[in-house]
Image (cartoon, rainbow, N blue to C red):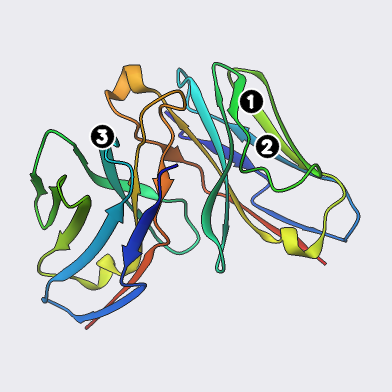
Amino acid sequence: DAGVIQSPRHEVTEMGQEVTLRCKPISGHDYLFWYRQTMMRGLELLIYFNNNVPIDDSGMPEDRFSAKMPNASFSTLKIQPSEPRDSAVYFCASSSYSRTGNNEQFFGPGTRLTVL
Amino acid sequence: GENVEQHPSTLSVQEGDSAVIKCTYSDSASNYFPWYKQELGKGPQLIIDIRSNVGEKKDQRIAVTLNKTAKHFSLHITETQPEDSAVYFCAASPPGEYGNKLVFGAGTILRVKS
């Protein structure tokens, strides 16, 4: 299996622009998670999905952030409009309790976002 | 909700020495405790985990211990090597309606000096 795939790996944009991050989970996994990592706040859970349905979005910082999962193999995290404080590394992770017997999450390589 | 605290935030050890990282959690119902290693420029990767019905688990140079009464768990790395240098995260999995969620600690930067 190719693992969790994220794109782009790096994104540099200007304040006010729309940013879309993409994630392809491991095939057969039924949970998908979006995290944000910064030096100040560590690894923060933003939102997660189960069978394409958002379960907990309490970590989404503001209405500028939105996430979708139109099917089992694709999810997006959108920031509109972006601000410099959104600069961080964004990780996508997927898991399947039925496959692994536990809540192990498999992380993608991350997208490093820089908002100027 | 669940809260996980991790100490120390940074740890420097000499190659060959042991390293210990400690975490505490708040929700006594949490039942799964993984440890992740994150190397520079990569996503976190699971290195070992333990369930609440087990007190200790070992995998070569890595071991994890769990004290449910005190609500803390620890990662032990013996005979450290330079390639062990990374950021380590502990996590806890609270049960309930939001099952399958992990709550992470703040991370420990481990430096192994050769």
Q: Residue at x 29, y 28 (%)?
A: A102
Protein chain holding label 3 = B
**Callout 1, which amino acid?**
Phe
Q: CA distance from mark 2 to mark 3?
A: 31 Å
Q: Percent from the top left, x then y, of residue A51?
A: 54, 16
* Of the pair B14 and B100, the residue shown nearer to us: B100
**Callout 2, which amino acid?**
Arg
Q: Is residue A49 left or right of residue A76?
A: left
Q: Residue at x 25, y 73 (%)?
A: B82
Q: Is residue A53 left or right of residue B76?
A: right
Protein chain holding label 1 = A
Q: Residue at x 12, y 72 (%)?
A: B18
Earlier residue among tags 1 and 2:
2
Q: Are marks 1 and 3 in contact (CB under 8 Å)?
A: no
Q: Are marks 2 and 3 in contact (CB under 8 Å)?
A: no
Q: Residue at x 36, y 59 (%)?
A: B5
Residue B31 badge: 3
Q: Residues within 10 Å of mark 3 (few under 14, many from 20)?
A: some
Q: Is residue A8 left or right of residue A81?
A: left
Are the numbered discs 1 and 3 placed on the same chain, yes or no? no
**Callout 3, which amino acid?**
Asn
Q: Percent from the top left, x then y, of residue A80?
A: 85, 45
Residue A74 badge: 1
Give above or below for A9 relative to B87.
Answer: above
Task: Give the labeled residue for mark 2.
Answer: A22
Q: CA distance from mark 1 to mark 3?
A: 30 Å
| Image quarter of the C terminus of chain A | bottom right
Q: Residues within 10 Å of mark 2 (few under 14, many from 20)?
A: many
Protein chain holding label 2 = A
Q: Are marks 1 and 2 in contact (CB under 8 Å)?
A: yes
- SS assignment at label 3: loop
